[in-house]
């Protein structure tokens, strides 16, 4: 069944002095999520925003907050971001080993949010296997996390197809697949044809002369790729 692609603009590329304006802009343009990159300077070599910002964003946004935790201590921080109003919470498989990844997914669900686990570009997707049956979404990084404006890593669409197959095999047909990194009009078709449902865009939207037009164009390209893949018996 065809599902339109959801665009999740990353506010890391927005104007931090005018976030209310920029969030209103992407909502009016049809964004599905507000993507919020939380970086701690330890798990990744950059520092961005934290709990107070998410709490205020929760009051501004009328679409779900997709909060991506790039932190070294996610189990400690998850309750804070749940209370702040995150609708989707993403933790990284690289920061949680064994039973602790399962516990993170449980904590997110217990808090009433949707659970997502991310993998860096060179992390084996087998890291998702222990929790894939319980996930609401999986995030495939198509750049190394830490900085916006990077170029798409070629071949990332193959990882999207692999995780889609893993979810089907686990009986989790409702799991969404999100892709983050270097996605714009030129690359969105590849990942959507492979099975991506949610597309994170930063500079491709907020760096465009017409952000609303850029968002709509990316969504159209993604939808066209999904329709073509369905016609061929894919995604």
Image (cartoon, grey):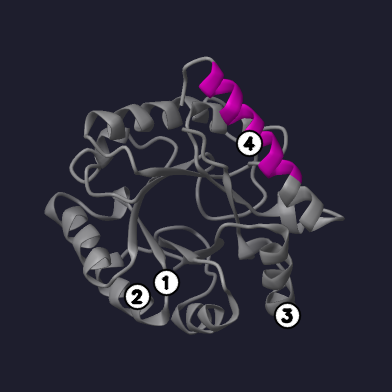
Q: Quadrant of residue 86?
A: bottom left
Mark identifier at residue 82: 2
Q: Tell me which label, 2 or 3, sits earlier in the chain.
A: 3
Do the numbered discs 2 and 4 sit on residues whose CB atoms are within 8 Å?
A: no
Residue picked out by circle 4: 222
Which of pointers 1 and 3 indicates the residue nearer the eye?
1
Between 95 and 186, the one nearer to me in the picture: 186
- Give the Cα separation between the discs numbered 2 and 3: 25 Å
Q: Is residue 23 visible?
A: yes
Which of pointers 4 and 1 indicates the residue nearer the eye?
4
Which of pointers 2 and 3 indicates the residue nearer the eye?
2
For mark 4, give the secondary structure.
helix
Q: Tell me which label, 3 or 4, sits earlier in the chain.
A: 3
Is the residue marked by circle 3 packed among few (<14), some (14-19), or many (20+) residues within 10 Å? few
Do the numbered discs 3 and 4 sit on residues whose CB atoms are within 8 Å?
A: no
Do the numbered discs 1 and 2 sit on residues whose CB atoms are within 8 Å?
A: yes
Between 19 and 45, the one nearer to me in the picture: 19
Mark identifier at residue 17: 3
Residue picked out by circle 1: 86
Is the residue marked by circle 2 packed among few (<14), some (14-19), or many (20+) residues within 10 Å? many
């Amino acid at each position: 069944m065809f599902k339109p692609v959801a665009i999740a603009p990353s506010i890391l590329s927005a104007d931090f002095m005018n976030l209310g304006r920029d969030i209103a802009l992407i909502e009016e343009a049809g964004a599905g999520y507000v993507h919020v990159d939380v970086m701690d300077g330890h798990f990744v070599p950059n520092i961005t925003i934290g709990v107070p910002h998410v709490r205020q964003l929760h009051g501004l946004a009328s679409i779900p907050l997709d909060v991506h935790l790039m932190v070294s201590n996610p189990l400690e921080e998850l309750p804070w971001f749940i209370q702040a109003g995150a609708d989707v919470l993403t933790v990284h498989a690289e920061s949680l080993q064994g039973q602790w990844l399962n516990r993170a997914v449980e904590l997110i669900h217990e808090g009433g949010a949707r659970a997502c686990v991310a993998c860096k570009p060179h992390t084996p997707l087998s890291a998702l296997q222990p929790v894939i049956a319980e996930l609401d979404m999986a995030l495939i990084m198509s750049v190394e996390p830490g900085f916006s404006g990077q170029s798409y890593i070629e071949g990332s669409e193959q990882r999207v197809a692999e995780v889609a197959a893993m979810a089907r095999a686990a009986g989790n047909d409702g799991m969404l697949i999100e892709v983050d990194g270097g996605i714009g009009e030129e690359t969105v078709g590849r990942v959507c044809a492979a099975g991506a449902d949610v597309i994170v865009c930063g500079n491709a939207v907020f760096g465009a002369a017409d952000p609303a037009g850029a968002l709509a164009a990316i969504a159209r390209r993604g939808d066209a790729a999904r329709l073509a893949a369905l016609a061929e018996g894919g995604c």
